[in-house]
Image: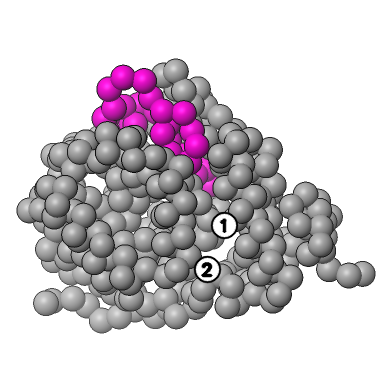
Amino acid sequence: MNDDHTAATPDPASDLAQAENADVTVEVDRVAVDGTYVRVSSIGEPGERAFLLVAGLGIAATYYERLAPHLNENGPVHALDLPGFAGVPRFRGRVSIERYADAVEKVIDDLGLVDPVLVGHSMGTQVVTEVAARRPEISDLVLISPVVDSHARTVRQSAFRFLRSTLHEPAAVRWHGITAYALCGWHWFSKVLPRMIAFPIEERAAHVQARTLIVRGEYDAMVPRDWVRRLARVFPYAVLREVVDGAHSVMHAQADAVARLAVDHVAGRLPDRGVSSLQRVRDDSTASDLSRLGPREAWLLVKSRFVELFGMAKNDDDTLEAAKSAHAVAMADGDELPVDPEDRRKVVDAVAPEAREAN
């Protein structure tokens, strides 16, 4: 294996700590698409460029909750809940990766985004690749755990590989997965799954003009090294990175490393040694959410998770805003980022007033 040495640990949190206050206010909006809508969770102020995050099959935008706050150096971050996932009403009639790409394009147009950085995870990589293939003006693409390996394009092979990957996922990722799949439901999941398995991402990659970063986790059996190398060769420009100890949901478990890779990719700071090189990066800074929080913040995080699930099940955007913002406060505290006291009070009082710090 001709992989390069392991690079130093990225630490975007230390850069963000230089800001006056961390942004912890999450706004939830809806963009109408084809008889249903896309739920858009946004954090950060309008800026030069936005990041647009698309999650995988059956998964909620919650999977990006640790990644999103570290991406808003140049503008807002918008994480999408697509139709059929996270309590969002399903499409009627046929379903396809192309139809999901139509929905993402509608979000781009309705939000007035100019050349957003498209970020996809798992099935989301197929969706954003399709969008980028249609829109040559998109200049940056980030594919995290791109599927499906063209040498293993069956449901049985994919299921076996996915289960192998879950052995290396932290408990928080497994919890998010179980709850997300429950909200999605087996009927819709089984309807979309064959479309994901069959989608030839490598064929659409040939039409992409964007500079592309491909990231995989070291233990991601769904996305083996030889597959990402073969896929990278199809793109006009691609850079490969592997995160040590990561698995399929590397953007959650090793969020700091993936965030720094994405930001450096957009800024043109990632060295390109060709697609045969798969440089490895390590993320020693990321611990589990609860292990780096005090008792109050840990309770705020846990309660915000259940409040968020309630909001998804009830399709209540106000509840979702409050829960997502409370999670952002807890994580800012875990990263020792400053939070405006008034913002903190409003957020904590809305979700867990019992967790408010005593004066």
Q: Residue at x 66, y 69 (%)?
A: 298
Residue 220 drawn above or below residue 98: below
> Viewed as shown, does residue 93 lie left or right of 154?
right
Residue 272 placed where, x, y %?
25, 64
Of 301 and 130, nearer the camera is 301
- Name the residue located 39 percent from the left edge and 80 percent from the top edge: 8
Q: Residue furthest right?
A: 359
To which residue does mark 1 refer?
A: 69
Q: Which residue is mark 2?
A: 12
Q: Quadrant of the C terminus?
A: bottom right
Given residues 310 and 105, the one toward you in this image is: 310
Within 10 Å of the Cα at label 1, are there few (<14), some (14-19), or many (20+) other Cα atoms? many
Q: Is residue 83 magenta?
A: yes
Q: Position of residue 336 (x, y in %)?
A: 67, 73
Residue 22 numbered tag: none
Point 77% across, 49% down: residue: 350
User: What is the magenta range?
Assistant: 76-103
Task: State the image coordinates of residue 283 (x, y, percent, origin top left).
Answer: 42, 76
